[in-house]
Image (tube, rainbow, N blue to C red):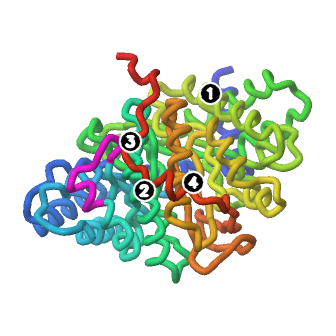
Amino acid sequence: MPISLASEEILETIRMVQMENLDIRTITMGISLRDCACSDIEKTCQKIYDKITKYAENLVAVGNEIEKEYGIPIINKRISVTPIGIVAESCKCNDYVQIARVLDKAAREVGVNFLGGFSSLVHKGMTEGDRKLITSIPQSLAETERVCASVNVGTTKAGINMDAVKIMGNVIKETAELTKEQDGLGCAKLVVFCNVPEDNPFMAGAFHGVGEPEAVINVGVSGPGVVLNAIKKNPKVDFGQLATIIKKMAFKITRMGELVGREAANRLGIPFGIVDLSLAPTPAIGDSVADILEAMGLERCGTHGTTAALALLNDAVKKGGAMASSYVGGLSGAFIPVSEDAGMIRAVEAGALDINKLEAMTCVCSVGLDMIAVPGDTSAATISAIIADEAAIGMINKKTTAVRIIPVPGKTVGEMVHFGGLLGKAPIMPVNRYSSQKFIERGGRIPAPIQALTN
């Protein structure tokens, strides 16, 4: 009997890989760069390069080996590092663009597709190092191919740093302008967070937190197609039964992810960290979170009922994953990146989904407004206000929220921008035409909600 069950599970996994787009979305190696800090930027850069290339030398090769041996696609191999705003702070220099170039060079040398951690944590205020990092972001993302940046502007405990929110609106606009030949592609590598997790393996928001070990392997799994197929097979069950079906599929996906992650960690000789069980979609047909919501009975993602459907999905994924592994972390749930989800793109084009509905959905999903393309003439203040709204949702609800928004230079509502690969394509979405300028100009810090004072 045990042999029969094992054979059945193996066949089921093969089917999920071949027919339902099941994959390991990323193996991400976190590397601490805290010991690379010194006053000489040339020495700091050399230490950073040497350490990354030493630890991650075999990351891609090991990922490829496991992929072949287990027959499970491992789409991306990535690196996250200690926030550069911390590492570079003691350097005597005016900006950190040189460090971004070195990070890009190291990422290219070891063969990973992205490296995250050109980041700062400024939820309660900024140091000089944080200011240098943030002002370096536009040029750094324009000059590099693989470097990703993130800034945490709020937490439930600290409130929202509105001075940082204001600055980030300008940073996003400048980044878009410097990469206008690629339709503002630099902004696709920049995330503004509230309540950022320190062990997230997904880009563009990954970094290696200060509470993390010297090096670690974190894994991000993805299986929207698996969940979609399970729901389609059960078109008339009630919501309680539907949640159980999703939990069972999330359990299986997570267990497979931890198996691969632990094997990679063992072969690389560094600790295993967490498995992030997020349902991360791609532009491929059948690999869409929006399709899952529509399979529940919605005519089109974005119509009334969408937020409730997403809440059920997100909660069931977390519950199933938590049963499968004691080391679930990162973001873990359901992503709704517009440009990376074929069903979301379809919903926007049909007029069923807009930014207001997406904002409501972010109250119950894993991230926030992700890969949203807006007109190029959208003001910095409007972008800052969008960030503030998302940060408020995260702060009040004690969850992670984020904004990855792209004001596409020279394009307006109704046009389409093509980013390619996993970044997909995005219809330009309208924003509210009324000004938030005076609100953003106030600055200061929005105080933390009273439930933050629990200790």
Quadrant (top left/top right/bottom left/bottom right) for the N terminus = top right
Secondary structure of the residue carrying numbered label 3: strand
Query: Of marks 2 and 3, which one's residue comes earlier in the chain?
Result: 2
At a point 38% along the width and 59% down the height, the residue shown is 115
Secondary structure of the residue carrying numbered label 1: helix
Given this view, does label 1 or label 2 mark the residue nearer the observer? 2
Query: Of marks 1 and 3, which one's residue comes earlier in the chain?
Result: 1
Given this view, does label 4 or label 3 mark the residue nearer the observer? 3
At a point 59% along the width and 37% down the height, the residue shown is 333
Quadrant (top left/top right/bottom left/bottom right) for the C terminus = top left
Q: Crowding at label 3, few (<14), some or many (≥20) Cα neighbours within 10 Å? A: some
Q: How many angstroms separate mark 1 from mark 2 (CA)?
A: 39 Å
Please give the residue where the numbered disc 3 appears in the rendered image: 445
> What amino acid is found at the position of numbered circle 2 in the picture?
Lys
Query: Of marks 1 and 4, which one's residue comes earlier in the chain?
Result: 4
Residue 200 x %, y %: 44, 44
Residue 163 x %, y %: 37, 51
Given this view, does label 1 or label 3 mark the residue nearer the observer? 3
Left or right of 163? Residue 88 is left
> What amino acid is found at the position of numbered circle 1 in the picture?
Gly
Please give the residue where the numbered disc 4 appears in the rendered image: 73
Q: How many angstroms separate mark 4 from mark 3 (CA)?
A: 45 Å
The part of the chain drawn in magenta is 121-133
Placement of 353 over or under 6, stated as above or below: below
On residue 378, the disc is none
Query: Of marks 4 and 3, which one's residue comes earlier in the chain?
Result: 4
At a point 51% along the width and 64% down the height, the residue shown is 188
Q: Are marks 4 and 3 in contact (CB under 8 Å)?
A: no
